[in-house]
Image (cartoon, rainbow, N blue to C red):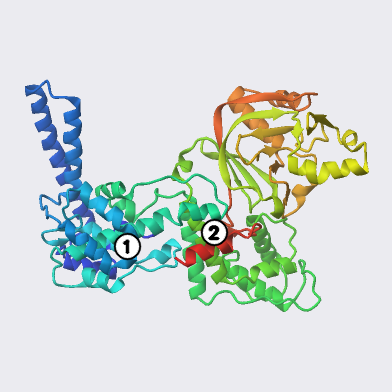
Amino acid sequence: MSVSFVTQLVSPTANVWLKTRRLNNCNINFFLLLRKERIAMKKLKLSIILLSGLLTFSSLSCKKEKDVKEDVTTKDVHNHDGDIIPLDSTAIDPFFEKHAKFKEFEPQVKELYKKHDYHYIWHDKKGVIEFAGVLFNRATQLDEEGLPTELPYQQEFNNLFYSMDGNKPDITSELLISSMYFYFTKNVYEGVDPEKSKENGWYLPREKVSYVDYLDTLMRDPKLIAKDQTEFYSQYYNLKKGLQKYRNIKRKGGWGTITLDEGVKMLKPGDTANAIAQIRKRLYKEGYLKNDNSKTIYDSELIEAVNAYDKRHNYNIDSLITPKLVKELNIPVEERIKTISVNMERCRWITPKVDTYDEYIAVNIPSFRLHYFQDGKPTLISRVVVGKKLNKTVVFSGEMSYIAFSPYWNVPQSILKNEILPGLEKDPNYLVNRNMEWVGNRVRQKPGGRNALGLVKFMFPNSNNIYLHDTPSKSLFNREERAFSHGCIRVEKARELAIAITKKHGDWNEKMVDEAMHRNSENIFRVKNKIPVYIAYFTAWADEDGNVAFYDDIYNKDERLAAMLFSK
């Protein structure tokens, strides 16, 4: 959610809950301050006790100190100021028999209460604790997380959180809230099952998190779940802003349809047509124009908006309105919303630790772009060519360990079988003409300007045999759609990337790189600290203001993932 913790708690829904919690009109910040002060006082008293203990019993072991600290931490979080309420463990099985939609969370719920010695977590003697209301507020607004799902047993939860009877501790209510917690973390934090994401061609590693243990962290600092600004890869929050933006467009009626006159192949600056007014309205709705003056002439104001659209989507900026552009602009806002939701799901599969890395390389396949980050900032951006549909570039990660200058190209067996051997049957000089040679039962191409890998390749060893490399076929980088390779990634600015890496990791200069690229034999530069490399697949990408760029789903992955996501 984009609203603040305080705003959530003083919303109309939360106000009713606050009244039932006997907080009346107290300021929530004051409430949190008191809570922190109480915890601080407890810790101060504890420190005094421990200090006295150490002075008196100098033989106290480190292990015992550790155990005491762990016990105190647990009490601080779950003790609710001393109101411990025992929980009857025999009631758990009957609860899940009655609430079958939560059945998958039964093992986690049992683990949770076993960890906390079978006492109530979500209730004190007065009723449901404040944090449960924060969780409920989030769990009932899953649509803001791009999730097409609703909290099961909604009426039971409504009765629990909106009733005015004080909500005395009740085993069913307690287990409902625990189940809600695991339902929320499963859908919002974890996302689609890792095995299903692999079925969708996603092999980036996913972190395993114990949400039983994570509850302690959330209860210590409820703002984590209220604001939730560090739990995901940062792109998630940008897309979330974009989701809100496009839903607002939908609520206002969408953006209509653009119709080119029959036979019109393009519109250029100065042209007049009814479609111009439609395009103007369409770009205004999405925020590319500040005003919609309804003019039918393709004027400078609209030229600027069209070029801004092309730039954001990595198109060639030519000020032309083509049938291809019109077709894209006619994609309904509902489809754009679904695309954003699908890519928010992909963000759940990426560790947020990426945002803390000083150095890494990221390639987004649908945008045909490589970004090299140093000191957490993009140092270099380059166009790339990726695998064609029959030779898809795999979504995975690795660590760049060395750079090969003036490389050999060891021809893959599939290319040897399907291309080179048939070529040899037709032309005995096939290998000589391509600067190739036999090495045992394999074929390789010698270093040089005609080498398929160009003058440099960047190696991050992986089972997919995919790497980054230069190419002699520079003209392909001028095309808007660049899925032409056999799976590896061709980098337009390969020389610049080599200069940036070798300067950081070996204090090389441009002259040294150029010499290494033009030798007659392969030579290796070892990367001192391996560089993380991420090959990802995002068909929607947003900036910090929620402005979204959409890219063609070149491998048709979105529809399959949407089917997984929207069928949950």
Residue 135 visible in the displayed image: no
For the C terminus, give its image quadrant: bottom left
Residue farthest front in this picture = 441
Name which residue lies at 67% across and 61% down: 304
Foreground label between 2 and 1:
1
- How many neighbours does mark 2 have within 10 angstroms: few (below 14), some (14-19), or many (20 or more)? some
Front residue (pair 156, 436): 436
Quick check: 525 left or right of 188?
right
Front residue (pair 410, 1): 410
Look at label 1 and name its amino acid: Lys
Name which residue lies at 78% across and 38% down: 452
Q: Tag 2, which secondary structure?
A: loop
Quick check: 213 left or right of 124?
right
**Percent of width and height locating residue 155:** 28, 74
Residue 547's disc number:
2
**Percent of width and height locating residue 262:** 78, 79
Look at label 2 and name its amino acid: Asn
Q: Are marks 2 and 1 in contact (CB under 8 Å)?
A: no
Front residue (pair 246, 434): 434
Q: Tag 1, which secondary structure?
A: helix
Q: Label 2 vs label 1: CA separation? A: 39 Å
Quarter of the image for residue 491 reads top right
Task: Tell me the residue that label 1 is attached to.
Answer: 103
